[in-house]
Amino acid sequence: MTILLLGAGLQALAIGSSLFKNREYELIVAADNLDVSGSIFFKRIIKVSVDSLDSLVSLVQDTECDIVIPTSDYYALLLSRNREYLESQFKVLCAVPSGESVSLVCDKQRFMEFCEEHAIPHPKTIPIHCNDLNGMEDTISFPAIIKPNYSVGAKGITIINSKEEIETKLPFIEKKYGSCTIQEFIANQDFYFNVMLYRYKDGTFSEAVVAKIIRFYPQNAGSSCCCITVNDQRLITICKEALHHMNWVGFADFDVLYDNKGGYKVIEINPRVPACLRIANESGVSFPEIIIDDLLGNTRKIQRSREGIMLRYLGTDILWFVSSIIHNPIPKSWFLFWGKDIFYQDIYKHDPSSWFRWLLSGLNKLFYRLTKKH
């Protein structure tokens, strides 16, 4: 069976690692970059730009794939909008929720409005436009966060402390990313949560995996560079209720903040697997297998997640260390590099191509940020 991964990155590596031992599957990666080139996890890697239905159809026909799995929000949206056509015309199975569901969560403003309507805990969020700021300061408590409606990871997210900063920074963010919202600043910035789960068509769920992000880079609003699995049933219940309201079918990846008053704040749902997917694999839950088994109608396997599994992204964790060493105490956990429950997003023992490629990628981010400041 041929599985096409639409997009590359750490997500593709984690999927490849999860499915590598199953000889029934042949994995092909199609992406506009070659950041997973040389990996033993994949039979074939195609450098291609997929930006339309025509290019997507050509790719499906060329690879003769049986299943398509997106690894980015962009590809998830493109695939979801054309899922019915692809499945009916080419008999290929698309691992993505409905187009309506994906469109909702990919628009951060619409998703916050949905949360408000259904009483899902979330940060206070209002739309903002650089051409209409009169009286805006009366509805905003500072500090606050400017957040693009469409962006990947932490791109474009900017902390602001005054109306003057909004007037200075918003035009540049809007020009680069498009429409934005302004969102309340959550007091607890020490950690946040990532929740992964799969909702079946009958409304039941797979085992959920909760990762507590204990270090992230950039430190003000960034992606995980160290996380650990925890058991938090209250948080899982909130995420399940959100998916029920959307009648979601498929995999979902939640980002959830936790404020100093003990309240959860759902900030987004990603309709594809996250870069930290490996923590689920190592904790005992293979979401790639869950996705494929459901698409094929196979018997569901019982999988259970273990607490205490640590996942580091060494490249960006080094950046976190460099940016923290002067102003913040370094926790003992930073110096834990080996152990039976410690794993890496960017290093796979059986895949030598990953040993330096992603470390260098993380260091390159540091160089970019240092040169950007001057």
Image: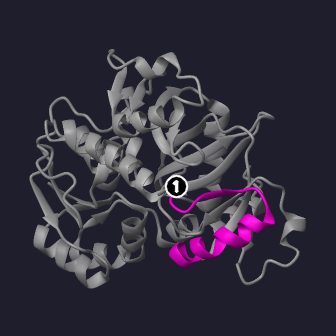
Q: In terms of depth relative to the viewer, which is nearer, 371 or 26?
A: 371
Q: Position of residue 284 (x, y in %)?
A: 37, 28
| 164 part of magenta stretch | yes
Q: In terms of depth relative to the viewer, which is nearer, 235 or 299?
A: 235
Q: Position of residue 318 (x, y in %)?
A: 39, 34
Q: How many marks?
A: 1
Task: Give the secondary structure at mark 1.
Answer: loop
The answer to whether residue 206 is seen in the rendering is no
Q: Check disc 1 and report the residue beneath it.
A: 154
Stretch of the chain drawn in magenta: 155-178
The answer to whether residue 243 is seen in the rendering is yes
Looking at the picture, does residue 262 appear above or below residue 368? above
Snapshot colouring: one colour
Q: Is residue 139 left or right of residue 164?
A: right
Q: Is residue 26 left or right of residue 115?
A: left
Q: Amino acid at mark 1?
A: Ala
Q: In terms of depth relative to the viewer, which is nearer, 37 or 239?
A: 37
Quarter residue 264 falls in? top right
Q: Position of residue 17 (x, y in %)?
A: 23, 39
Q: Position of residue 148 (x, y in %)?
A: 59, 67
Q: Residue visible at 58% across and 48% down?
A: 221
Q: Residue visible at 54% across and 26% down?
A: 230
| Residue reaching furthest to the front | 374
Quarter residue 314 falls in? top left
| 147 part of magenta stretch | no
Q: Residue visible at 11% across and 43% down?
A: 40
Quarter residue 142 falls in? bottom right
Please identify the dominant SS of the magenta region. Answer: helix
Q: State which quarter of the image contains the N terminus.
A: bottom left
